[in-house]
Image (cartoon, rainbow, N blue to C red):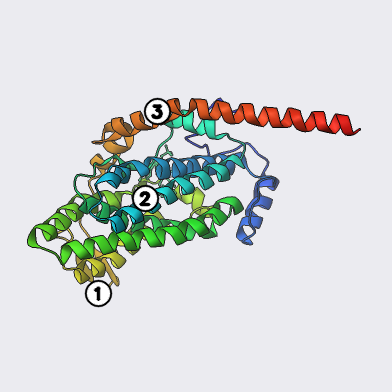
């Protein structure tokens, strides 16, 4: 059934026009689509692709920050970071469960990730070199994630939309913990301020890339907007992110690394410089600084967790057999 793989969702279908039109009417009427509802194959595959990629991003996204748990500068920072990374594991699980409602298993999704076929967010292929990177990730990466995920709470697919509500509440705490780390460093010694500025310089452009290619190069964008999976385009969300982040940087006295960043009175938005799309595609295709390490870490976790999965399955089978035996005895 999944011989084409889960990714590269085909949005063109051979389904009959009346069915597609009726489905579109439900979408246009803002009805939520639920797991057992009839849906076009392209809609189902698009969601599996996007939700799967989103789940993988959460799980792979635990790695750069996990790198600093043992080196957090105080007990308070360590407790907050631990809680944040744990939340990300939870987000991954809600998202894998949401994707499973579309008829794909977590094992299949993981296999595609480990085979390098399923994507995860480009941002997690960069290294966390200093403690300030933890601040920059919370502030910028979680800030970008919130901008992208708040509209997903209104996504047409019910299980994804509902998962996003809790995820967004937690992301909001993540963003604040990051911004507070940056604020503390920016108001600290000159060396601390320099660490914060250096982290901002390295994470700013990759954070803008998180929103995906320009709308003109966004292969799935138009169809996903029509299906109300996406509510805003990649460029619209990127612009909202820039507009809301500039004053936050000014407030803590840090400079965004973009000489072309300038308020445009006419547009009512900030203009910003060109994004290096060659770098984006290189990272997406596996050539980023940490792609290899990230997949190796996930492969190791998958291999070392095999006994847990086997034990859980054996336990479930035993319980089922016991329940059946008890049922037979009662009859
Ligand atoms: N990285 O047609 P487009 C977090 C791919 S984790 C890699 O515009 P679409 C956190 C795209 O998949 C939050 N690949 O696609 C965790 C497509 O390739 P395929 C992560 C990217 O789907 C821990 C191709 O480029 N958030 O918050 O309409 C710690 C063309 O793109 C990227 C989500 O996953 C990228 N950045 O729009 C801290 C949100 N961008 O699949 C924080 C859910 C694009 O055809 N996802 N590509 O091979 C979405 O909202 C959408 O999928 C995107 C892309 C906006 C990302």
Tell me if residue 92 comes above or below residue 198 in the rendering. Answer: above
Alpha carbon distance from label 2 to label 3: 22 Å
Which label was assigned to residue 299? Answer: 3
Say whether residue 63 is left or right of residue 91.
left
How many numbered badges does the structure rendering display? 3
Label 1 CB less than 8 angstroms from ligand 1: no
Q: Residues within 10 Å of mark 3 (few under 14, many from 20)?
A: some
Image quadrant for the N terminus? top right
Q: Residue at x 68, y 28 (%)?
A: 317
Residue 228: % across, % down: 54, 55
Alpha carbon distance from label 3 to label 1: 50 Å
Tell me if residue 63 comes above or below residue 211 in the rendering. Answer: above
Q: Residue furthest bottom?
A: 265
Which label was assigned to residue 82? Answer: 2
The answer to whether the residues at label 2 and label 3 have Cβ atoms under 8 Å apart is no
Element type where label 1 sits in the image: loop
Q: Nearer the viewer, residue 322 or 260?
A: 322
Q: Residues within 10 Å of mark 1 (few under 14, many from 20)?
A: few
Q: Residue furthest left?
A: 190
Which label was assigned to residue 265? Answer: 1
The answer to whether the residues at label 3 and label 1 have Cβ atoms under 8 Å apart is no
């Amino acid at each position: 059934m999944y011989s084409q793989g889960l990714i590269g969702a085909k949005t063109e279908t051979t389904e009959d026009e009346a069915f597609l039109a009726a489905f579109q009417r439900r979408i246009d009427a803002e009805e939520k689509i639920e797991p057992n509802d009839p849906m076009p194959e392209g809609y189902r595959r698009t969601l599996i692709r996007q939700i799967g990629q989103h789940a993988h991003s959460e799980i792979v996204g635990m790695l750069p920050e996990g790198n600093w748990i043992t080196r957090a500068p105080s007990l308070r920072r360590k407790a907050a970071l631990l809680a944040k990374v744990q939340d990300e594991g939870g987000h991954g699980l809600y998202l894998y469960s949401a994707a499973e409602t579309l008829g794909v298993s977590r094992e299949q999704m993981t296999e595609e990730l480990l085979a390098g076929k399923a994507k995860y967010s480009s941002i997690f292929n960069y290294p966390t070199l200093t403690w300030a990177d933890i601040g920059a990730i919370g502030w910028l990466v979680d800030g970008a994630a919130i901008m992208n995920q708040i509209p997903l709470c209104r996504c047409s697919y019910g299980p994804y939309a509902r998962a996003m509500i809790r995820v967004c509440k937690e992301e909001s705490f993540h963003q604040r913990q990051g911004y507070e780390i940056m604020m503390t460093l920016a108001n600290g010694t000159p060396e601390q301020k320099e660490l914060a500025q250096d982290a901002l310089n390295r994470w700013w452009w990759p954070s803008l890339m998180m929103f995906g290619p320009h709308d003109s190069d966004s292969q799935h964008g138009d169809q996903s907007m029509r299906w109300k999976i996406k509510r805003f385009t990649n460029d619209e969300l990127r612009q909202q992110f820039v507009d809301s982040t500039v004053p936050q940087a000014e407030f803590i006295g840090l400079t965004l690394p973009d000489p072309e960043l300038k308020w445009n009175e006419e547009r009512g938005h900030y203009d910003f410089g060109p994004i290096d799309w060659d770098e984006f595609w290189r990272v997406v295709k596996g050539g980023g600084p940490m792609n290899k390490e990230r997949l190796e870490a996930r492969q190791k976790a998958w291999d070392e967790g095999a006994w847990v999965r086997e034990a859980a399955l054996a336990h479930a089978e035993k319980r089922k057999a016991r329940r059946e035996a008890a049922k037979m005895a009662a009859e």
